[in-house]
Image: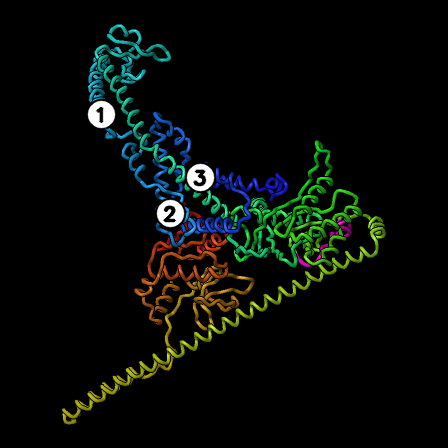
């Protein structure tokens, strides 16, 4: 049950329909948008959400799916069902193209049954093979014309037409040449057609010099278009052949229409499927534009939403370069009716309309703009009372119209209902309006209904705090700046901040003192208490946020230390093993040399010259295996100097490590050494060239045993970062580009999706700062468009 009748207009859902129609590719999908309606069937809503979510995945994956020729052929079917009628060539051409699209859609879902099960199940609507498509293709060519071989008679007729046209042209050209040589034709003239017959242009004063029939004349009257008597019979023959061709084409089209006629019932079902596919794709496109998701749907009634946004408000703010403040809300059987209070223009009505819009979108089968971890429910009844319903014809005042709505709500609301009331109780004397609103609120609470109510009445805040099932909510307010924060806080009432706002505006202190006196000391103290609570909440939130930031930083440093220690321990063991192996090899070499020397001396019977020679060889070997007292030589890296900027490669002066600068803040830089990030002072860094960085990578590869062939086998030129957070993609993209560059690849592909474009902008800004990247651009529109970035690396 929906109330009132113009509910969709009240919440601006009609605008959502228009935006969905913009995403459709044909009237087939638009018809489904018009038919879309609010459903209380949880199974149906789940199925609709799954279908849209699956199509959203198809679009984001970049897989090829038919995107054109979703033609509405129902008018052609109506025409074809009448015996004796026939469809024209262009109409059959449209039917053929749409049947081809239908065939491709069916083929896609058959190939992806397991991935897109809900969409695959739509194929149950289709009971049509490709026989009709093949029959049309045999008659209609790619340009939408009847093929020459559509029938034997048509083939003969068209062959004869070509023969006669060639014969006609030859005769006319001969006559035209003769006329031109005699100066009977204009200088720049040529053979042309008038009235469907080939003619030659002749100067008006010479028209009597050539026998024939005049069919037309130029605008100036200086030229006439004459059909020579010599070609009259040929032109007549051509006309007869054209009539024969027309009759044969009509005969062929009539037969083809007769072939189509038995398929009309199946075609209606098949194009119902095609329209549904267009509609679901439109919903998926809209979901991507609004960053909408498929939430969890529970039978137990609850609203546990995170980061909900009003799509229309978000679009409007985006055009102004602003961001919407997302809404987090929790309602359950203990806290069903949320009473929101707060200052004017603080966001109460926006919050109410956001909840109403998202809930209505959900029950119409649309993905909704909130986090996918959010939990939603289905309600049978949807009631709303927003705005001024004053009606002069029915003699209804604004307050009377609100009371009519309240009467309806209290009569028909139940635990399966969700209701929305904006500015509850206003429109009449506050003392009486507040009392009536209080009674209605308690009555609505007894029905077990869920909903959101906005108000300024203090007595309603008190009722909400004392009764089970009701809960207060406040719109956050910056008390120091006296500006709204547009954030909902559930659990406490909000102050209207009327006195504070009046004071800021500059209202006289005497007026404010008078107001405080007549408001009553108790009411003023109550409002002051709310203001004090708001101040303390802001203060403690700042403290908590700072502590959380420090904890995160501490955890990060601890993790970095642990990773560094593990790396050192691992390398230490590796170096010891390598040293042992090298020492063993040297020892074996020395032993072999000593044994060979002893054998040589014995064989020479201690000849002094031989012994001297052997001793010299042993001394040379000693020199080779003797440890170098100096430090192990590292390849010298050229320092290029200059100011260090983001993206530059640098070397740490104290340990020689090579790193890349991620960001610079004052005298400190954030650097990355592989996957390890750290902050160091700029004075500890030396700027090196990109070529030196390449050399260091090659040295590193030799040092660590980097196997290029194995890396190439494991490496994929496609990187999918959808769903990743901004801080996660930095190392992923950096390593991906570095690996691709080291392997000598030219083209790479990064899939980040479209959404709000945040991931795309982060990725591309990062790529622009990489010296190994030559060019970045969008993927082809059919393979993901701006949701995919193509990266071309430097040679």
Give me the residue at 67% from left, 64% from top: 540
According to the image, label 3 marks what residue? 25
> Residue 108, how many percent across, how many down?
36, 47
Residue contact between numbered discs 3 and 1, judged by CB atoms under 8 Å:
no
State the separation of the CA atoms marked 2 and 1.
Answer: 42 Å
Query: Mark 1 falls on what kind of element?
Result: helix
According to the image, label 1 marks what residue? 153
Query: Mark 2 falls on what kind of element?
Result: loop
> Residue 72, how many percent across, how many down?
42, 35
In the displayed structure, 743 sits above or below 610; it is above
Q: Is residue 310 left or right of residue 98?
A: right
> Residue 400, how many percent across, how many down?
73, 40
Q: Which residues are magenta?
A: 489-504
Give me the residue at 34% from left, 46% from top: 107
Look at discs 3 and 1 and give the one toward the viewer. 1
According to the image, label 2 marks what residue? 64
Q: Is residue 174 left or right of residue 571?
A: left
Q: Quadrant of residue 255?
A: top left
Packing grade of label 3 (10 A; few <14, some 14-19, many >=20) is some
Give me the residue at 84% from left, 54% from top: 520
């Amino acid at each position: 049950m929906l109330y009132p009748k113009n509910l969709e207009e009240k919440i601006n859902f009609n605008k959502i329909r228009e935006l969905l129609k913009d995403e459709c590719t044909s009237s087939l999908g638009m018809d489904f948008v018009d038919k879309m309606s609010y459903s209380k069937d949880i199974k149906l809503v789940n199925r609709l959400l799954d279908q849209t979510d699956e199509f959203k995945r198809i679009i984001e994956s970049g897989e090829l799916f038919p995107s054109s020729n979703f033609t509405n052929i129902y008018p052609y079917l109506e025409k074809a069902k009448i015996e004796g009628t026939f469809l024209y060539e262009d109409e059959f051409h449209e039917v053929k193209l749409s049947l081809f699209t239908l065939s491709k859609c069916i083929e896609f879902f058959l190939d992806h049954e397991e991935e897109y099960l809900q969409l695959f199940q739509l194929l149950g609507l289709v009971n049509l093979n490709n026989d009709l498509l093949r029959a049309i293709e045999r008659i209609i060519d790619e340009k939408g014309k009847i093929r020459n071989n559509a029938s034997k008679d048509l083939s003969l007729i068209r062959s004869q037409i070509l023969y006669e046209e060639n014969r006609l042209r030859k005769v006319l050209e001969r006559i035209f040449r003769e006329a031109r040589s005699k100066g009977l034709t204009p200088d720049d003239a040529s053979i042309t057609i008038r009235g469907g017959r080939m003619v030659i242009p002749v100067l008006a004063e010479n028209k009597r010099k050539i026998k024939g029939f005049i069919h037309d004349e130029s605008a100036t009257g200086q030229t006439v278009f004459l059909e020579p008597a010599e070609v009259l019979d040929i032109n007549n023959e051509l006309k007869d052949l054209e009539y024969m061709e027309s009759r044969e084409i009509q005969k062929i089209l009539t037969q083809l229409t007769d072939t189509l006629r038995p398929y009309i019932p199946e075609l209606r079902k098949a194009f119902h499927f095609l329209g549904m596919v267009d509609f679901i794709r439109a919903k998926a496109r809209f979901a991507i534009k609004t960053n909408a998701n498929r939430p969890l749907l529970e039978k137990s009634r609850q609203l546990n939403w995170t980061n909900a946004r009003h799509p229309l408000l978000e679009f409007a703010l985006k055009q102004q370069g602003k961001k919407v403040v997302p809404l987090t809300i929790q309602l359950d059987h203990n806290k069903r009716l949320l009473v929101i209070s707060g200052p004017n223009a603080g966001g109460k009505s926006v919050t109410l309309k956001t909840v109403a819009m998202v809930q209505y979108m959900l029950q119409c089968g649309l993905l909704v703009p909130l986090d996918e971890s959010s939990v939603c429910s289905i309600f049978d009844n949807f009631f709303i009372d927003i705005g001024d319903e004053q009606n002069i014809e029915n003699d209804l005042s604004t307050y009377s119209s609100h009371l009519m709505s309240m009467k309806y709500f209290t009569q028909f609301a139940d635990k399966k209902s969700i209701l929305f009331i904006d500015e509850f109780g206003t429109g009449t004397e506050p003392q009486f309006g507040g009392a009536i609103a209080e009674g209605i609120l308690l009555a609505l609470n007894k029905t077990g209904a869920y909903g959101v109510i906005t108000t300024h009445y203090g007595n309603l805040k008190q009722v909400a705090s004392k009764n089970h099932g009701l809960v207060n909510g406040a719109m956050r307010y910056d008390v120091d700046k006296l500006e709204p924060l547009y954030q909902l806080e559930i659990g406490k009432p909000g102050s209207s901040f009327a006195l504070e706002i009046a004071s800021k505006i500059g209202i006289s202190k005497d007026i404010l003192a008078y107001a405080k006196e007549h408001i009553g000391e108790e009411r003023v103290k109550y409002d002051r208490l709310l203001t004090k609570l708001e101040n303390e909440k802001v203060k403690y939130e700042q403290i908590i946020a700072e502590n959380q930031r420090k904890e995160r930083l501490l955890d990060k440093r601890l993790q970095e230390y642990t990773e560094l220690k593990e790396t050192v321990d691992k390398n230490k063991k590796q170096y010891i093993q390598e040293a042992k192996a090298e020492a063993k090899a040297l020892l074996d070499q020395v032993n072999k040399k000593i044994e060979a020397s002893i054998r040589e001396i014995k064989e020479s019977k201690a000849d002094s010259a031989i012994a001297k020679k052997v001793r010299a060889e042993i001394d040379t070997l000693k020199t080779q295996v003797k440890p170098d007292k100096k430090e192990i030589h590292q390849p010298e890296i050229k320092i290029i100097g200059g100011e260090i900027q983001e993206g530059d490669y640098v070397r740490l002066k104290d340990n020689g490590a090579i790193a890349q600068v991620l960001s610079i803040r004052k005298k400190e830089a954030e650097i990355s050494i592989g996957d390890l990030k750290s902050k160091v002072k700029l004075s500890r860094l030396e700027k090196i060239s990109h070529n030196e960085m390449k050399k260091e990578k090659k040295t590193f590869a030799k040092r660590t045993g980097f196997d290029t062939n194995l890396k190439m086998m494991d490496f994929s030129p496609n990187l999918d970062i959808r769903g990743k957070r901004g801080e996660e993609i930095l190392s992923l993209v950096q390593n991906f580009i570095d690996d691709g560059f080291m392997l000598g690849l030219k083209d790479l592909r990064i899939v980040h999706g479209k959404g709000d474009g945040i991931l795309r902008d982060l990725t591309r800004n990062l790529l622009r700062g990489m010296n190994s990247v030559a060019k970045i651009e969008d993927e082809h529109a059919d393979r993901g468009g701006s949701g995919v970035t193509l990266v071309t690396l430097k040679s």
